[in-house]
Amino acid sequence: MIYDPLQHALTAAGTYRTAKNYFPSAVKEWVEVKDTIHCEDLHYYARANTLFTACEDNAETRFSWFPPLVNMVKPLQTQGSIHSINPTASIQSKAQPKGNSADG
């Protein structure tokens, strides 16, 4: 048996992983999330058959803080958004929280 910290490091580095094809073959069409440059953190809400994702809307602010480990100079005013995606109808929409406007 390999020493535990070494075993952990090798596993975290992907040494024991096998290559898999993660491309979903059942996808009929991709849903483009408009007015964004990057989306992440997809969450599926089964009761509504809806995906929710957090998106970055501005390339300048995105790349001024990312990666965060080396770029902690000053706080930034960033613009992000939450989008919902209906996977059955292949449509998306930008969420507008109550009491907030899109401009501000």
Image (spheres, rainbow, N blue to C red):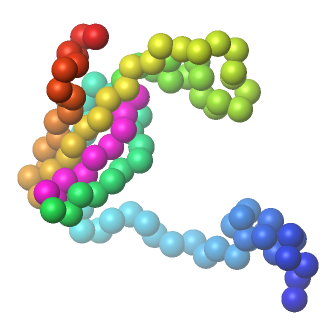
Residue furthest bottom in the image: 1
Q: Is residue 96 above or below residue 24?
A: above
Location of residue 1 in the rendering, given as x and y in whole percent from the top left corner: 87, 89
Residue furthest right in the image: 3
Location of residue 28 in the rendering, given as x and y in whole percent from the top left corner: 18, 59
The image quarter containing residue 65 is top right
- Kindly identify the residue that appears in the image at 61 percent across and 76 percent down: 18
The magenta stretch spans which residues?
48-56
Q: Nearer the viewer, residue 78 or 91?
A: 78
- Kindly identify the residue that appears in the image at 38 percent across and 63 percent down: 23
The image quarter containing residue 83 is top left
Side of 93 where 6 appears, left or right: right
**In the rendered image, is residue 104 in sight?**
yes
Side of 5 where 103 appears, left or right: left
Q: Is residue 52 magenta?
A: yes
Q: Assign the magenta stretch its main secondary structure.
A: strand
Side of 18 where 94 appears, left or right: left
The image quarter containing residue 7 is bottom right
**In the rendered image, is residue 60 in sight?**
no
Q: Is residue 94 magenta?
A: no
Location of residue 20 in the rendering, given as x and y in whole percent from the top left corner: 51, 72
- Kindly identify the residue that appears in the image at 41 percent across and 34 percent down: 38
Q: Count of labels shown?
A: 0
Q: Quadrant of the C terminus?
A: top left
Residue furthest front in the image: 99
